[in-house]
Structure formats: C-alpha cells, structure tokens
Image (cartoon, rainbow, N blue to C red):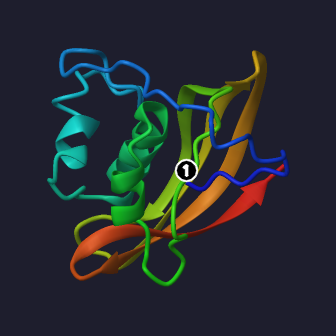
Amino acid sequence: MSRRTSRPRRPDTVTVRSPRTDPASPCPCGLPATYEECCGRFHAGSAAPTCEALMRSRYTAFVVRDAAYLLRTWHPGTRPPSVDFDPAMRWTGLEILDTTEGSAFHTTGTVTFRAHYTDDGRPDALHEKSRFVRHDGAWVYASAVFID
C-alpha cells in the first residue's frame, strides 16, 4: 500500500504521534485476533507467509505509523527514501476485495483492497490493487494501481 497525496506538505514542526496499539488490542487489519497475535508479530520481525498477510500488516503499519516496517517490506527497486505520515489522517478500516496467487507456492501475487480513512475528519477511501513479489525469500510490496 502506498499513500500519495497532492496536499501540500505540513511544516516539519508538526509531531506525528503513533496511535496507541498495545499487544492485547484488536488488530487494526480486521482479522479476529489481537495485534500481538496478528500483525504485531510481523512488525516484530516474523515474515508474512502470504501477500495478503503482508498487505494486512502494511495497512496496520500505516495505522500505528511504523515507517521502519513499511520501508523494510517495500521492494528496494520502488522503495522511497522515507515514509511521511499526515497527522490529520486516521486509517479506520480495511476491506480485502480480491487476491491472486501470493501463497507459499508463488513468487508473485496481488491484493485488491479498500482502505478507509478520515482526513481532517472527512471520510474517504483508498481503492488499490497492490502487486507483491518475493525478494530474498520474503514477500515485499512492489507497486500499485489505484482504482476509482
């Protein structure tokens, strides 16, 4: 998942605080598990076994503002130098709409999803088809096509 915006960059003096998620909190990705049992284990260093699991964990990384994880799971050929989080944006839900390939038996896969958010309190959604590839044995985000 990438987040591109045409909104002007906010001054560097704005501090972006990570929303509170503790290990026992429900996982933001929407699966019926705690953050620790679900996406938290990937953020802590375990490899995501499928591209859908990686997609969910990357969404959760946007929710908790874990830039290091996002960069670590981004293909080096398309990875930006940094990830900037908009302090007015809050991710509010994830819908997985479709997946192709992306299992332990594949080297590529796609996940089509809709990620809901509010921006300065206004609801909106990002509809995207993300492409994932194996790099050094692990799933990484490679690119996306925005839908809508």
- Residue at the location (47% across, 32% down)? 63
Image quarter for residue 50? bottom left
- Tell me if 63 is positioned left or right of 5 in this view: left
* Circle 1 SS class: strand
Tell me: residue 121, above or below residue 146: above
Quadrant including the N terminus: bottom right
Tell me: residue 101, above or below residue 66: below
Image quarter for residue 78? bottom right
- Residue at the location (19% across, 15% down)? 24
How many marks are shown on the rendered structure?
1
- Residue at the location (19% across, 22% down)? 23
| Residue bearing the label numbered 1 | 98
- Residue at the location (64% across, 43% down)? 12
Where residue 36 appears, as percent x and y from the top left, is 18, 29
- Tell me if 54 is positioned left or right of 132 in this view: left
Where residue 34 appears, as percent x and y from the top left, is 23, 21
- Tell me if 48 is positioned left or right of 95 in this view: left
